[in-house]
Each structure stands twice: as C-alpha cells, then as structure tokens.
Amino acid sequence: MMRILITGTGGLLGSNLALEAASRHTVFGVDRSCPQKTTAFTPMVADLLDPGVVERILDDTQPDWVIHCAAQANVDACEHDPENARKLNTELPRKLAHHVARGGARMLHVSTDAVFDGQKGEYGEEDPPNPLNIYAQTKLAGEYGVLETSLDAIVARINIFGWSPSGRRSLAEFFYNNLEAGNPIKGFVDVLFCPLLVNDIADLFLKMLDRGLSGLYHVVSSESISKYDFGVAIARRFGYDPDLITPVSVSQAGLKAIRSTNLTLRVDKLIHDLGVVPPGLSPGIDRFYTFYQQGYPQMIRTLCAE
Ligand SMILES: NC(=O)c1ccc[n+]([C@@H]2O[C@H](COP(=O)([O-])OP(=O)(O)OC[C@H]3O[C@@H](n4cnc5c(N)ncnc54)[C@H](OP(=O)(O)O)[C@@H]3O)[C@@H](O)[C@H]2O)c1
C-alpha cells in the first residue's frame, strides 16, 4: 500500500482516479474549489498557486507518489488568459516536480495528446510535438519542466472521457446531456482521437506506479474514432436518436483556439513496458453505460456538492 497525493480531485480525472486509488492505497486529494465530501480518501481544499501551499501539503501528507491532474484544461479559457494558463500548466508542474523530488517521492504528471499538430496522426513518444494553441503550448512546456526537474518522473499524455463531479466536463457527458434532452448537436467528422474511460486510465496509472515506470508515455485507448462517430456510439449505447448529431467539420465550429485534427497516438511503448493493452472504444463506452446504470454519475456529483 502506497501513500498517493492526487491534485485536482474536483475534476474529471482527479475525482475518478482518487476513488479508484483509494480502494488500494492511502490517498490524499487536493482541489481549489471542490469541498470533496468523501470518506474514501482524505480531501483538502487549497490553491496550489498560493505561496507555500505545495510545500505544506507535501509536508503534511508525506506521499510516495504525487499524481498531478490539476490544470487549466479548458482550451478556450487558455486563449482568454494565457498568463493563468502558463502559471497552472507550466510553472506549477515544474515547482511540484522540484519539491516532490527533494522529498524523495515520485511524480506522475498528466499531459495531453494536443501537444501534436495533428497533421500526421499515429504519433509515438519519439515524434516531435508542435502545439497549435496556448493550452497545448503551456502543457508541453509543463512536460519539459517536469522531465528536466525530476529524472524518474512519469509524463502521461492522455485523452479521456467519463462521468465528472460537474456533470459536464467530458465530451461523452456533452453528448449524453444533449441527447437525453433531445437537443440537436454537432459532431466533428475530421477530428480523430483515442479517448480512454477515466476509470480505465486510473487502473493503468496505478499499474504504472506499481511497475515503477519513468519517462514519457502515451496512455490512450488502443483504438481511434472521430468525435462525430464517438457521439453516434454514445447515442446508440444509451438508446438515443443518433440523427440528433449533425456531422460537421471543426473548421465550421467558430472555436477560439485552433484544434489539431488527427490526434491518434500509438501505445506500443506502454504495452511493451506494462504488459497491458489499453481498452478499445466499445468496452470503454460499455463500461461508461454500466456506470450510468449503477448510479455512478449521481455518486460522483455528491463529491463536490455544496
Ligand atoms: N479532459 C480531457 O479530455 C483531457 C484531455 C487531455 C488531457 N487532459 C489533462 O488531464 C488533466 C485533468 O484534466 P480534467 O479534465 O480532469 O480537468 P478538470 O476537470 O478541469 O479538473 C482540474 C481540477 O483541478 C483544479 N485546479 C485547477 N487549478 C488548481 C489549483 N491552482 N489548485 C488546486 N486545484 C486546482 C480545478 O479546480 P477549478 O474547477 O477551481 O479550476 C479542477 O477541479 C489535466 O492535466 C488536463 O490537461 C484532459
């Protein structure tokens, strides 16, 4: 059993990861705004950007591992406030890596598939990144800061879906919420990605810690899909009308930040080093639906309820 500190436990990844990890380890969670009503792990409310907070929390919790999920993960918000994005996505991971390494612990830093420009697809860890927007640029600089500061850190580039405390953090929730309400929506036919259910990623992360891996890894689904087809798959799984989703190009969407189109990543390094193949898309969507049938969305929402 290890002591694991998880940051951003009010968010999509951090909340699910903390609950999953808490069944096997002693878990501490920190988040800026979510009060985290749970007995599964020890929750703390703090802003990691405040002076002295990183040092104090590491002192108080004495973790073996820190899994850093807190970020400014809203791509368009990063374009609106690049300075805040730089503080959260670049400066904070480097600072955390410095203090984690100094205390003799190890860090798994969460990054993104969006560091690539999406011109080629099928990216491996050896491919040169070329981030197109502020979010991706600040996340890539965060990766470099962590790997330079802590030689045995893990940096995991991910893409995720799942049930979140806010009920509207993931693309799968966007499709589910609108389909359930009968709202017509758009799905991008020209954006390809490899989304992995957060609960499956939690399991892979814990295996990576157990195995003592270090360095850069792509931790995504072993299959790719367009965002439009992903929406259609969610509609079919939940028994909603797929015709509510109109196929469109991302170039027609009027989004503030430029998006990369082909974000398919290879996972052969992970498979080789971990001996586990990440789940494909159907099993992930099936498990997302099973969680729904079991009342998991309501349960996860209570985590941050006032
Ligand atoms: N969501 C995706 O599809 C996706 C895809 C690729 C990579 N990622 C990466 O995965 C990681 C987790 O993403 P996510 O979707 O789970 O993000 P999220 O839902 O936005 O959660 C991030 C959490 O961190 C908290 N936080 C932010 N700044 C903080 C601070 N200074 N101190 C303490 N807590 C702070 C946020 O609180 P507030 O609500 O107050 O800001 C939020 O609860 C990020 O590194 C992201 O870049 C996500």
Image (spheres, rainbow, N blue to C red):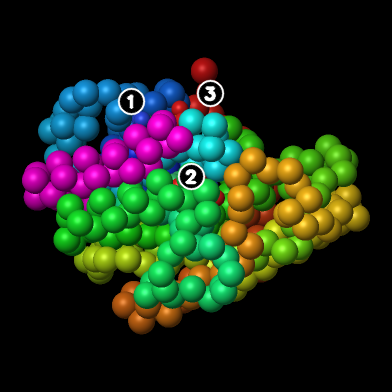
Residue flagged by tag 1: what amino acid is it?
Answer: Asp
Q: Is residue 226 left or right of residue 146?
A: right
Residue 224 pos. (x, y %): 62, 70
Going 58% across and 39% down the picture, which residue do you hit?
76
Q: Is residue 252 left or right of residue 217?
A: right
Residue 263 pos. (x, y %): 57, 65
Q: Is residue 285 left or right of residue 265?
A: right
Vertical placement of residue 118 versus 16, above or below: below
Residue flagged by tag 2: what amino acid is it?
Answer: Ile
Does residue 237 appear anywhere in the picture?
no
Vertical placement of residue 293 versus 304, above or below: below
For marks 2 and 3 on the same chain, the one whose residue lies earlier in the sequence: 2
Residue flagged by tag 3: what amino acid is it?
Answer: Ala
What whole-number distance in Å separates the C-alpha atoms at marks 1 and 3?
19 Å
Residue 285 pos. (x, y %): 65, 60
Q: Is residue 278 left or right of residue 151?
A: right
The residue at which mark 3 appears reads as: 305
Q: Give the crowd class for mark 2: few <14, some 14-19, many >=20 residues within 10 Å.
A: many
Going 73% across and 54% down the picture, which residue do you hit?
250
For mark 3, give the secondary structure: loop
The residue at which mark 1 appears reads as: 47
Q: Give the crowd class for mark 1: few <14, some 14-19, many >=20 residues within 10 Å.
A: some
Does residue 179 appear anywhere in the picture?
yes
Q: 278 and 93: which one is in front?
A: 93
The residue at which mark 2 appears reads as: 134
Instruction: Please report the bounds of the magenta region as a residue range.
Output: 82-107
User: In terms of image quarters, where does ligand 1 lie?
Assistant: top left
Q: Is mark 1 within 8 Å of ligand 1?
A: yes
The image quarter containing residue 271 is bottom left
For mark 1, give the secondary structure: loop
Residue 218 located within the stretch drawn in magenta: no
Q: Is mark 3 within 8 Å of ligand 1?
A: no
